Amino acid sequence: MANIEEGGFGRNNEESASFWTSTEFVQITQKMIAELIGTYFLVFVGCGTVALNKINEGSITFPGVCVAFGLTVMIMVYSVGHISGAHLNPAVTITFALFRHFPFKQVPLYIVSQLIGSILASGTLYLLLDLKAEAFFGTSPAGSNLQSLIMEFIASFLLMFVISGVATDNRSIGELAGIAIGMTILVGILVAGTISGGSLNPARSLGPAIVMNQYKSIWVYMIGPLLGTMAGGFTYNLIRFTEKPLREITKSSTFLKSYSRKPSDAASTRNFS
């Protein structure tokens, strides 16, 4: 009995050790670090311009803030897109998984990495700039919650529609993905910013809210982007079919599965955000 137990214990140790040194573990760790760093700089640069614009009485200007967010996303797509897919956004990660462009088992790891990156960046800004409550660099509705929810939905719909086109469709020009997505972020914030603050990203809103302890209408920035990205992803996958009539595509109970590819690593499927 002792020999059997020792043998079993030894095998378990070997299996555990092999996992921690396996290629799979190394790859997912690299992806998590890439998502953390990408989200960190998205929040640090983007939200940093928001804070500095308030501190310096609008010297950066609202369009300048939009450009900062758009350029940062574009830079991160080209920097870490080939490693993690550069989601940088929990809503994008969840939507990719729902439409089978990303493995579900990696979703929690990506979301945790994105949230940690956002919180760390927000903490850095808070300490560096010695911010007061009036210089809050998160998002809060300028209008009603309903207006902000609808605006977040529409802007996030556009974002995911574009991402689906440039990152999941082999007919697109992949080299231009970063530019297309960055410009979409810029335009989305430009349109939504004066109403909802232009989040389009739960992590971008949650990090500053946690650090500065301001949770006003935070649910808007969780639900709006998630529903918007899901709708945008669904719509693109609906119209991407070009070989069959729509009635043949939608009449089957396996409609949602008919266009889906087998989940694979984020980097290999060009999943950018």
Image: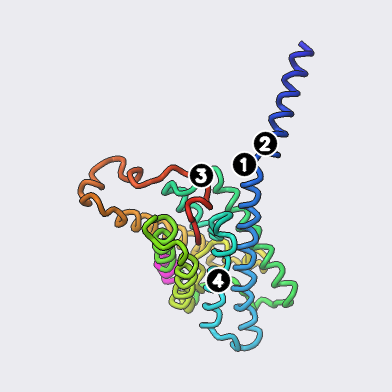
User: What amino acid is labelled 2 in the image?
Assistant: Phe
| Displayed quadrant of residue 76 | bottom right
The residue that mark 3 highlights is 104
Q: Secondary structure at mark 4?
A: loop
Residue corresponding to mark 1: 24
Element at label 3: helix
Instruction: Compare residues 38 and 134 and report the one nearer the observer.
Output: 38
Q: Is tag 2's residue or tag 3's residue first in the polypeptide sequence?
A: 2
Could you tell me if the residues under marks 2 and 1 are in contact, i.e. CB atoms within 8 Å?
A: yes
Q: Marks 2/1: CA distance? A: 8 Å
Residue 160 falls in image quadrant: bottom left
Q: Which mark is residue 139?
A: 4
Q: Name which residue lies at 69% across and 63% down.
A: 120
Q: What percent of the width, then of the height, locates residue 23?
A: 64, 41
Q: Nearer the viewer, mark 2 or mark 4?
A: 2
Whether 115 is drawn above or below 257: the answer is below
Point out the tag, 2 or 4, that comes first from the N-terminus: 2
Distance from Cα at disc 4 to Cα at disc 1:
37 Å
- Span highlighted in magenta in the image: 147-154
Amino acid bearing label 4: Thr
